[in-house]
Amino acid sequence: MTTTILKRQFITDEEGNPVAVILPMEEFALVKDILDRRSQTTDEADKLAQIEQAAQDPLFMADLRETMSAFAEADAEWWEPTQ
């Protein structure tokens, strides 16, 4: 029977507070899915914040209106074809 000893290396800031940890691959594999989900959630929150900011940006909104106007005819042909 073999015994596996897993060790962690803690990284501290100048005051000695732990700020990070280096895990063995076996332990990392146990938490990888959780970390990936958290990262995706953060990315989605950042994207939503950018969308909210864009809606308040007058230059972005002016450019959006101009682009929509330029493609209005093509959009109408695509979505509402004449018979």
Image (spheres, grey):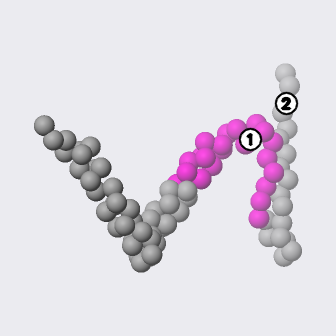
User: 29 or 37, which is in the foreground?
Assistant: 37
User: 36 or 24, which is in the foreground?
Assistant: 36
Q: Position of residue 74 (x, y in %)?
A: 30, 49
Q: Where on the picture, by quarter, is residue 18?
A: bottom right
- As for residue 38 lying within the magenta part, the answer is yes
State whether residue 32 appears in this view. yes
Q: Main secondary structure of the magenta part?
A: helix
* 6 horizontally vs 69: left or right: right
Q: Position of residue 9 (x, y in %)?
A: 85, 53
Q: Position of residue 60 (x, y in %)?
A: 44, 71
Amino acid type of the residue that numbered disc 1 sits on in the rendered structure: Glu
Q: Dot 2 corresponds to which residue? A: 3
Q: Earlier in the sequence, mark 1 or mark 2?
A: 2
Q: Quadrant where the N terminus lies?
A: top right
Q: For numbered disc 1, what is the local secondary structure? A: helix
Vertical side of 44 occupied by 57: above or below: below
Q: Which residues are magenta?
A: 19-41
Q: Where on the picture, by quarter, is residue 64?
A: bottom left
What's the mark number on residue 52? none
* 32 horizontally vs 43: left or right: right
State the CA–CA distance, disc 1 to disc 2: 15 Å
Q: For numbered disc 2, what is the local secondary structure? A: loop
